[in-house]
Image (spheres, grey):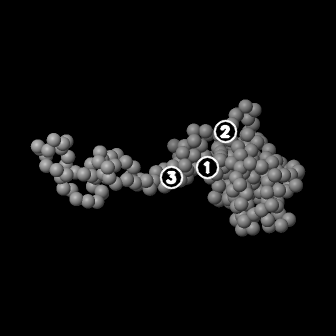
């Protein structure tokens, strides 16, 4: 991503299912934080990736290897090295020293920080021209082939994320078998899902819903800051 030629207002193209540009939706960058906060976005991506880790890798230590604790042979006068247990890490079939144990990799971020990271992700993708909208995602027939044709028409030929205003079972079934394609609603959208694909395809309704929610949060934050300053 580059910020060269960055402007406070951007236009997101709106396509029909035939791939023709029929309109544009104006995006107020100020309502999304002005410019992408790349440090915050990176922190959010690390959090989402860490939260996907299972952390179930486990090995047996000396205390968990089953068997007798009897000394293999007496301490002295055998001509062999002294040993106290056949379950030492240096023995075949023994325990593992300093091996992995189950752990929780989860990280947390404040809700407002996650929201700002999502706004930064949207801005970064929009600046690179990787965000577009479809006027009405109404397929002639509920088939995977029809959805793949629409994505090809709008230029989402590689990985893409389709964002809907509300869940649609038919559209989800048409999308699930397309390689590299995923679908979610505005409420489920996060910075990690936004950044990963090459294209982010909103429906017009979903894009307006997303921008309105971001504008409302920006207004609430501004009002809270003004109130706090007035109280001081």
At a point 65% along the width and 46% down the height, the residue shown is 195
Give the camera-side residue of 18 and 78: 78
Q: Check the image and name the residue furthest to the top.
A: 4
**Which of the two discs, 1 and 3, sits closer to the camera?**
3
Q: Check the image and name the residue furthest to the front.
A: 79
Residues at badges 2 and 1 in contact (C-beta under 8 Å)?
Answer: no
Disc nearer the start of the sequence (2/3):
2
Residue 53, numbered circle: 3
At a point 19% along the width and 49% down the height, the residue shown is 84
Q: Secondary structure at mark 3?
A: loop
Between the residue at mark 1 and the residue at mark 3, the CA separation in whole angstroms equals 14 Å
Between the residue at mark 2 and the residue at mark 1, the CA separation in whole angstroms equals 18 Å
Picture quadrant of residue 178:
bottom right
Give the camera-side residue of 221 and 155: 155
Residue 229 placement (x, y as % from top left): 55, 43
Residue 22 placement (x, y as % from top left): 88, 51
**Which of the two discs, 2 and 3, sits closer to the camera?**
3
Residue 192, numbered circle: 1
Residues at badges 1 and 3 in contact (C-beta under 8 Å)?
Answer: no
Give the camera-side residue of 154 and 185: 154
Relative horizontal placement of residue 43, taking residue 88 as reference (left or right): right
Q: Residues within 10 Å of mark 2 (few under 14, many from 20)?
A: some
Q: Residues within 10 Å of mark 1 (few under 14, many from 20)?
A: some
Q: Residues within 10 Å of mark 3 (few under 14, many from 20)?
A: few
**Which of the two discs, 2 and 1, sits closer to the camera?**
1
At a point 46% along the width and 51% down the height, the residue shown is 105
Q: Secondary structure at mark 1?
A: helix
Picture quadrant of residue 168:
bottom right
Between the residue at mark 2 and the residue at mark 3, the CA separation in whole angstroms equals 30 Å
Disc nearer the start of the sequence (2/1):
2
């Amino acid at each position: 991503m580059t910020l060269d030629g960055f402007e406070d207002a951007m236009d997101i193209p709106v396509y029909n299912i035939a791939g023709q540009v029929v309109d544009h939706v104006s995006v107020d960058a100020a309502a999304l934080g002005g410019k992408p906060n790349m440090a915050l976005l990176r922190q959010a991506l690390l959090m989402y990736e860490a939260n996907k880790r299972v952390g179930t890798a486990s090995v047996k230590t000396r205390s968990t290897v089953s068997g007798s604790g009897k000394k293999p042979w007496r301490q002295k006068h055998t001509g062999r090295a002294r040993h106290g247990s056949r379950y030492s890490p240096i023995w075949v079939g023994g325990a593992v020293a300093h091996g992995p144990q189950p752990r929780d990799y989860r990280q947390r971020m404040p809700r407002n920080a996650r929201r700002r990271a999502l706004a930064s992700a949207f801005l970064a993708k929009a600046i690179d021209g990787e965000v577009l909208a479809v006027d009405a995602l109404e397929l002639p027939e509920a088939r995977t082939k029809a959805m793949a044709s629409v994505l090809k028409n709008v230029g989402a030929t590689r990985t893409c994320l389709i964002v809907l205003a509300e869940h649609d079972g038919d559209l989800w079934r048409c999308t699930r078998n397309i390689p590299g394609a995923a679908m979610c609603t505005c409420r489920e959208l996060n910075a990690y899902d936004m950044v990963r694909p090459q294209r982010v395809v909103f429906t017009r309704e979903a894009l307006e819903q997303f921008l309105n929610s971001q504008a409302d949060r920006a207004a609430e934050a501004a009002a809270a800051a003004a109130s706090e300053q007035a109280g001081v």
